[in-house]
Amino acid sequence: MAVVSLLRSVVFNIFYVLWTIGVGSLGIPTLFVPGRRSFAVPHLWCRGLVWGARILLGIRWRVEGLENLPQGACILASKHQSAWETLFLPMLVPKPVFVLKKELLSIPFVGWHMAKTGMIAVDRKAGASAMKTMLRGADAAFAEGRQMIIFPEGTRVPVGENPPFQPGIAALYARFGDHVPLVPVALNSGLVWGRNSFVKSPGEVVVRIFPAIEPGLDKKVFTERLQAVINGESARLCGNGDS
Ligand SMILES: CCCCCCCCCCCCCCCC(=O)OC[C@@H](O)COP(=O)(O)O
């Protein structure tokens, strides 16, 4: 079995590079269209890789709670166990905007389109100025009615681990929580595509979308509520809690 998963992972990684160069090249003209943002390239790229993972690696998915996904501007605050959700979650929303680590902007093709589609790149080591960059970017993105995807943990986390949240998510809730719904997302992608694991295994990822957290909570109550939903439900989906 391990040999088959290894071979499938080799083929998928070759597909990943070819699909990125192909879509990235195809999309180069969109980089020069002034002003107007098109999400066609990010959506095509993500959809191709997620389906590639399904066909080549056997990684299926099931989404629960789609009815909780708001129209218009919103914040998807998601558990982060794998690169898989960075590809899958943008497929669920029309105008995705990620808060992402700035290192990603230096990746050829991918970085160009991330910059063009106004992703919010933050230097995770820059503290207060990173917070300012994120809040300014969020303000502009919500004014365009975009759906922000943010990983409160700020990094991919091994299954079963629940590190403290980065300060950004509470700052977003404090600044925009009264008019931009913040929606918790739990998942178990780390079971099939772990952090930095070259070999991926077949299986079903469950993505569970919860109703928005009510506005007006104080920072401590908000953070505890969000952690309980994201970490508690992800643990259940990973089989480390009563399902
Ligand atoms: C070729 C065309 C490419 C088009 C690209 C458009 C962008 C599509 C969405 C991809 C967004 C990726 C967002 C990643 C967010 C992020 O930065 O999360 C941090 C972790 O993951 C990695 O951190 P770590 O686990 O600490 O390595």
Image (spheres, rainbow, N blue to C red):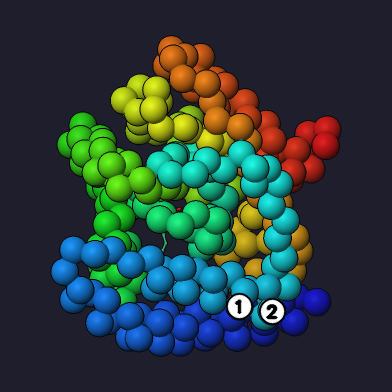
Residue 98's spot in the image, x, y percent?
38, 51
Q: Label 2 amino acid?
A: Ile
**Residue, x 61% and y 32% (percent of image)?**
211
Q: Secondary structure at mark 2?
A: helix
Left/right of residue 18 with respect to residue 175 in the rendered view: right
Q: Is residue 36 above or below residue 27?
A: above
Q: CA distance from mark 1 to mark 2?
A: 5 Å
Q: Is residue 20 above or below residue 200?
A: below
Residue 107's spot in the image, x, y percent?
30, 71
Confirm whether residue 153 shows in the render: no
- The residue at which mark 1 appears reads as 52
- The residue at which mark 2 appears reads as 55
Residue 135's spot in the image, x, y percent?
26, 36
**Residue, x 64% and y 54% (percent of image)?**
190
**Residue, x 39% and y 73% (percent of image)?**
41
Left/right of residue 163 with respect to residue 34 in the rendered view: right
